[in-house]
Each structure stands twice: as structure tokens, then as C-alpha cells.
Amino acid sequence: MSERPLALVTGASGGIGLELARCAAADGHDLVLVARRGGALEAVAGELASRYRVGAQTIVADLEDPAAVGLIGARLERPVDVLVNNAGFGIWRAFGATEPAEVDGMVAVNVAALTSLTRAHLPGMVARGRGGVLNVASVAGFLSGPNAAVYYATKNYVVALTEGLAVEVRGTGVTVSALCPGPVETGFQDRAGMGETSMKSMAMMDARTCAETGWRGFRAGRVLVIPGAGNKALAKVPRLMPRQLMARMVAGVQRPDH
Ligand SMILES: NC(=O)c1ccc[n+]([C@@H]2O[C@H](COP(=O)([O-])OP(=O)(O)OC[C@H]3O[C@@H](n4cnc5c(N)ncnc54)[C@H](OP(=O)(O)O)[C@@H]3O)[C@@H](O)[C@H]2O)c1
């Protein structure tokens, strides 16, 4: 059996998750890669295993399914040392124009699956006195977002959960971090149906830079990792103005341009 630590990365078939899996592999971790698209996952696993000489297992799972976390657990051959809760998506539409099922699906992936996976693996890390959880939140986790209100609320949950757990595990040898990016160029914008909003035309970070910043911060034990000076400033906005005014400001940025 491999002596290397094991990192489980959700949403590793593309975007930020693929790059976080690369960081974990480059840092000497074997990988368990989770997502729905099996072909894309296999390609990522093959590339990272051969480039970094680590083990890479793939598990095809839909995290909207409440049974998925148990099914993933049943496929694991050894304990997880690092859990990267990255899978997630947004819906950029007025609340009343969303489909009920897609909203439920987003909460299931962004909130419920992330929480269940953390509950499944964090206590074992604490018992072993090593490892950690890296949750991919967003700078949206500090704000309220009209026209993507549920997405912003899910990321507020991820930030709050991370901050709470980080204090609970202090001194155990285990860390819990949240990576809070601003706009990153991935498949996220198209899946969210962002269209031509001011937000889509904002400067975007590349996924590798975002992931490398997040992985470095996580390894350094930082609770909140916010890549980019502009995003750090944005995360402070709620401390500088009334929350209602902040929400109206975000609404302006998200207004369709056309
Ligand atoms: N891009 C941004 O601007 C941005 C900014 C801040 C935060 N984030 C956060 O970053 C994380 C990664 O997003 P990304 O930008 O890399 O977007 P992405 O390119 O769309 O990647 C999303 C990943 O999540 C997986 N996923 C989605 N739904 C899933 C489900 N039901 N079950 C299992 N896996 C699922 C996707 O894989 P499959 O399609 O193969 O299932 C894919 O690997 C998300 O949590 C997102 O909220 C993104």
C-alpha cells in the first residue's frame, strides 16, 4: 500500500478542481477524483498519475444524490488525509425564474454534499492528528447577491462552516480552510447561464493561479484564502457599508448589460 497521503478532490474533471488535484499530486498526494463525467475524470487521472508518479483513483458520482457520499466512502481503500470540497455550481437568474429542481440541486451539491463529506472524513483526521479540509467557497461568501441569491447564500454557508470548524479543530494537527476566489475562467460561467452580465466582463483569474494560491494557503494553515488584491478588498466591503447597500451594489454589477 502507498505511503503517500491521500487527497480526495470533488469536481476534479475540470476547472479549479482539476488544478487543485494537480497541486495535491505535485505535493506528493495520491488522488481520489470525483465528478459526474467519467471520461474527463479518467483523462485527468491518467495525466496527473503519470506526470507526478502518484496513484489516482476515479469515482463517478453525482453529488446531487444524497446517497453519493456513502457510495464514495464504500469505494475508498484507505482513510482520506486531505478532503478538497470543490464541486459546485451557480445559477445566475432571478429567484422566481429558476427551476425548483435546479435550486435544490445546487443546495445539494454546494451545501449538503460538502457538509456530509466533511462529516464523513474530518473526525477521522482529528483522531489521527493530521490532515485537513479545503472547501472551495467564493468571494460571494462574504456578500449577498441579487439574481444569484441562492448561490451567494450557499457560499456564505461554506465560509461560516469553515470558520466554525477551523476553531473546533485548532491544536489537533488538522486544519480547515476556505478558498474564496473572485471570477475564475472555467466552465462555471456557462453552466451558471451568466450571459452578458457586467460580472462576466470582469477580469478573470486563471484556474491554475487560483488553485496554487489556495493550496499554498491551505498548507500554511490559513482559514480564509482570498486570491487577488481586488477580491480581498471586496471581501471587506460588508464591514464598510450597510448590508442592504452592499446587496444593491452587487445587484448593479450583476445587471445584464444587454
Ligand atoms: N469560476 C469561478 O468564477 C468561481 C469563483 C468562485 C468560486 N468558484 C467555485 O469553484 C468551484 C469549482 O468551480 P469551477 O469554476 O472550477 O467550475 P467548473 O469548471 O464548472 O467545474 C465544476 C466541477 O464541479 C463538478 N460538479 C458539478 N456538479 C456536480 C455534481 N452534481 N456532482 C459531482 N460533481 C459535480 C464538475 O464536474 P462534472 O460536470 O464532471 O460533474 C466540475 O468538475 C465551485 O464550487 C464554484 O462555486 C468558482
Image: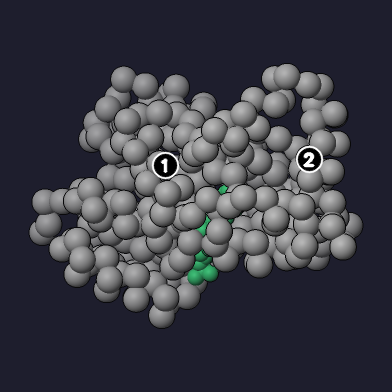
User: Taking 193 as reference, is 118 left or right?
Assistant: left
Q: Is 57 drawn above or below residue 134 in the view shown?
A: below
Percent across and percent down for residue 91 are 72, 58
How many residues crowd around disc 2 within 10 Å: few (fewer than 14), some, or many (20 or more)?
some
Quadrant for ligand 1?
bottom right
Q: Amino acid at mark 1?
A: Gly
Q: Is residue 193 left or right of residue 74?
A: right
- Ligand 1 closer than 8 Å to label 1 CB: no
Residue 34 visible in the snapshot: yes
**Image quarter (top left, top right, bottom left or bottom right) of the C terminus:** bottom right
Where does label 1 land, which residue? 214
Q: Position of residue 66 (x, y in %)?
A: 56, 60
The residue located at (49%, 39%) in the rendering is: 227
Q: Which mark is residue 18?
A: none
- Camera-side residue of 23 and 231: 231
- Is residue 91 something that shows in the picture? no
Task: Pinpoint residue 197: horizontal percent, then vertical percent.
Answer: 78, 57
Q: Return the residue nearer the eye: 155 or 186.
A: 186
Provide the secondary structure element on which disc 1 rests. Answer: helix
**Which quadrant of the view contains residue 218?**
top left
- Residue 72 vs 127, above or below: the answer is below
Please, which colouring scheme is shown? one colour
Q: Are marks 1 and 2 in contact (CB under 8 Å)?
A: no
Q: Which residue is mark 2?
A: 250
- Name which residue lies at 38% across and 26% down: 169
Residue found 27% across the figure and 73% down from its top: 46
Q: CA distance from mark 1 to mark 2?
A: 24 Å
Compared with 89, 126 (above or below) is: above
83 above or below 233? below
